[in-house]
Image (spheres, helix red, strand yellow):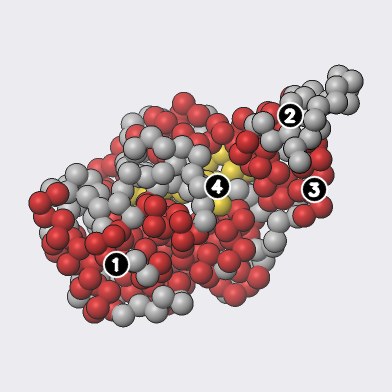
Amino acid sequence: MQTLEQLTQSIQPLDQSAMQQAKARVDGLLKPIGSLGRLEMLAIQMAGIYRSPALEIGRKEIIVMAADHGVFDEGIAITPKEVTAIQAFNMTKGRGVTGVCALAYAAGVAVNIVDVGIDCDPIPGVLDMKVARGCGNIAKTAAMSQEQCESLLLATARLAMQRVQDGISVLGVGELGIGNTTPAAAMVSVLTGAKPEQVVGLGANFPSDKIQHKIAIVEQAISVNRPNPQDGIDVLAKVGGFDLVGMTGTMLGGAAAGVPVVLDGFLSYACALVACKICPAVWHYLIPSHLSAEKGSQVALAHMDLKPFLQLDMRLGEGSGAAIAMPILDAAITMYNRMGLLKDAALELPTPK
């Protein structure tokens, strides 16, 4: 895989034969048809993704893309920029002591932290794929060049594909970057056509009385850079960030490798919008975890026709929502494999009309 075109061409539609076989099994389980709701649909979707009606629980990993943002200088965050590097380091301490690490530990999920643009020296234990020490200030210029964007997309897609080759069967996405809800809001605004005030939220406890300033910065970023809403790469390069590119690349790579990609919150929705713009087939590989409490979440999800499994009023990021949702995939597969069959119990239940 040498080019973005080759990457997108390798992403296949779901296997309809496997899905039909999976549906027949799900409908024949010891229960009324449809009574386990979205778990049934999830099992069928995974059969299509894996291209087999034989489902197994495998290893899971959340890839966390970390980077700093030039737009931080515009006063759009109250958390110090250094927290990006501090939290990346905290993900390497023992089993990791951040929110996503704790929640992933509970779910038996690995966390892989990747530096794609933190404004610091390399951190031991963090995979170094740094493009630069922070991206451009989108309020004044593009976040990065198109060449940087495409190169990082390919590099992070290759990382995702390599992790699948190494035995990972489910990928989750996460991010770390102080101020990154600002570029994410700009991306969502451009790609959905929503006005900035409809999608700009408080992020990491930004003061509500200053929200108009953050909205103005998003408006300025869009006005200065004029991203093309029909070109996902143009949007990423102009008003995105290295962490957002990395998450998008993970989605593309996961889909190309034929595994489910579990989304996180608002930042991941912005990246999913781009990934689906680059290659619409990616949509079928996405598993929406939770409804982020960040403003703009409903707009982004509705635009993609995605319905999250959970609503916990979370807005931490890091991949925390993906971690909590991973056991839902296990539940769907366990339902599929361990429930008895109606025919074996000599039962015949009425079918829905």
Mark pair 3, 4: CA separation: 20 Å
- From the viewer's perspective, is 265 left or right of 28? left
User: Residue drawn 46% across and 66% down?
Assistant: 274
Label drawn at residue 32: 2
Q: Is residue 205 above or below residue 183?
A: above
Marks 2 and 1, the one that precedes in the sequence: 2
Of the two numbered discs 1 and 3 on the same chain, state the one appearing first in sequence.
3
Secondary structure under tag 4 reads strand
Task: State yes or no: discs 3 and 4 in contact (Cβ < 8 Å).
Answer: no
- Residue displayed at 37% across by 45% down: 292
Marks 3 and 2, how far apart in space? 18 Å
Q: Work out which residue is located at the far top of the displayed protein and give it.
A: 345
Residue 84, position as x, y percentages in the image? 26, 48
Of helix, strand and loop, which one carries label 2?
A: loop
Mark drawn on residue 172: none
Q: Quadrant of residue 194 in the image?
A: bottom left
User: Dot 3: what SS?
Assistant: helix
Tag 2: amino acid: Pro
Q: Residues within 10 Å of mark 3 (few under 14, many from 20)?
A: some
* Residue of label 3: 20
Q: Pointer 4 and pointer 1: residues touching (CB < 8 Å)?
A: no
Residue 278: x and y in percent read: 53, 70
Q: Quadrant of the N terminus?
A: bottom right
